Image (tube, rainbow, N blue to C red):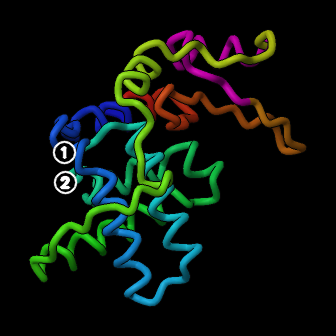
Amino acid sequence: SGPAGRMDALPDATPEEEAELPNWFYTFHMWMVAEGRKEQTAKSYASTLRVCYEDDGKSIKAMSSWEYHAITKASMKNKIGNGSRAASVKAFIEFMADHTAKGSELQAHDGSRIYILKNAEERREARRNKPPAEQEEDSELVLLFRAELGVPADWRVHNKGRKSGDLLRAVSPGGTAYKNRQEVDE
């Protein structure tokens, strides 16, 4: 199965886990500062991890796995964001290993917005009703590529014209990019 199937295979957070997430994000932030990371970097990583959760809805155990890191690293959102999502997840994996090894306690968050999730029902509804990406009328080349890959209408197709030829990518609603049918099928 492709990256979308791999992401779907990872466990979603339970409502109980979701209620604790602001404390996880805060504890992760405080750990990074204690480990010597700059405050702004720690804040950015904690905030980015929250956004990953808001987009994917995965459990803490799933988000601290190398499988989640690999899927996140391959995503278009990570590529567009200069690798910030993968960097945040990697730091979170390191944090969880240390946190678990030391038997550390979860700290209560300080109420800052960066730790607070968007309303859970709004997030679920947005994921369910995500509209097809707005894009210009598909060119003949894009239509052919879309047909060749057999991708659904809610997938975006990016066409980057280059001197060496067009670079076409189909992007799933989850943000993973594919360049051929084999990648979609994996």
Magenta residues span: 139-158
Marks 2/1: CA distance? 10 Å
Q: Pick whichever, 62 or 183, lies toward us.
A: 62
Q: Pick whichever, 110 or 140, lies toward us.
A: 110
The answer, for residue 186, to whether it is visible in the render is: no
Kindly identify which numbered label has been placed on residue 61.
2
Q: Quadrant of the C terminus?
A: top left
- Residue 151 magenta-highlighted: yes
In which image quadrant can residue 143 be found?
A: top right
| 131 horizontally vs 129: left or right | right
Residue 97 on image: x %, y %: 20, 74
Q: Which residue is mark 1?
A: 17
Give above or below for 107 relative to 177: below
Kindly identify which numbered label has been placed on residue 160.
none
In which image quadrant can residue 180 be found?
A: top right
Q: Nearer the viewer, mark 2 or mark 1?
A: 1
**Residue lying at 19% horizontally and 54% vertically, measured from the top left:** 61
* Neighbours of disc 1 within 10 Å: few (<14), some (14-19), many (20+): some
Q: Pick whichever, 132 or 51, lies toward us.
A: 51
In which image quadrant can residue 167 be found?
A: top right
For badge 2, the amino acid type reads Lys
